[in-house]
Amino acid sequence: MSPALDPALHSTTRLMLASYLSGCDSAEFQAVQQYCGLSPSNLSKHATALSELGYVQIDKGYVGKRPRTWLSLTATGRNALHDHVAALQQIAAAAATAGQRTP
């Protein structure tokens, strides 16, 4: 039986977004955008989709008078990312085992 990959994290953009956010408590929208090489609208679309699944929290506020948005990976998102990566590792391990030849 194949391990269960999370369809929400199948997209490389969403996987990169969740992976980036897993390394911090929260990140400013612009920092995530720059690191991931995304347009603001593309990042917003993917962050919103992950937020609707409960994987990402989107917080809006101000720094001085400037509006800011912060993104953070929720506990649900961290678990989903962990399980997705574990499934990928399981697939690789199965391939390594299948690729071994017996003399």
Image: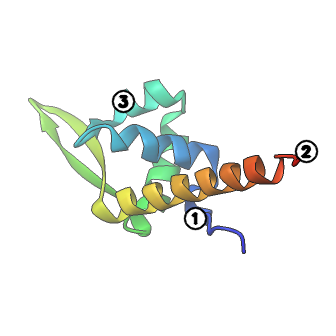
Secondary structure beneath dot 3 equals helix
Q: Which mark is residue 6?
A: 1
Few, some or many residues within 10 Å of mark 2 (<14, 14–19, 20+): few
- Residue that numbered label 2 is attached to: 103
Q: x, y percentage for residue 32?
A: 40, 33
Quarter of image, res 2: bottom right
* Place of residue 83 in the rendered image (x, y in percent of width and height, measured from the top left): 48, 61
Q: Estimate the spatial distance between the alpha carbons at disc 1 and disc 3, rounded to whole Å.
A: 26 Å
- Looking at marks 3 and 2 on the same chain, the residue that comes earlier in the sequence is marked by 3
- Helix, strand or loop at mark 1: loop
Foreground disc of the pair 1, 3: 1
Label 1 crowd bin: few (<14), some (14–19), many (20+), radius 10 Å: some
1 or 3: tag closer to the N-terminus: 1
Please state which of residues 52 and 6 is positioned toward the viewer in this rendering.
Answer: 6
* On screen, residue 85 above or below 25: below
As drawn, is 98 to the left or to the right of 11?
right
Q: How far across and how far down the image is residue 89, in percent?
A: 60, 50
* Residue type pointed to by label 3: Gln
Compute the Cα span from label 3 to label 2. Answer: 55 Å
Q: Amino acid at mark 2?
A: Pro
Task: Name the amino acid, label 1.
Answer: Asp
Give SS at disc 2: loop
Label 3, on which residue? 30
Mark 3 neighbour class, 10 Å CA radius: few under 14, some 14 to 19, many 20 or more: some
Q: Is residue 55 left or right of residue 75?
A: right
Instruction: Tell me, yes or no, whether the two marked residues, 3 and 2, touch with CB atoms within 8 Å.
Output: no
**Quadrant location of the N terminus in the rendered image:** bottom right
> Residue 17, relative to residue 58: is it above or below?
above
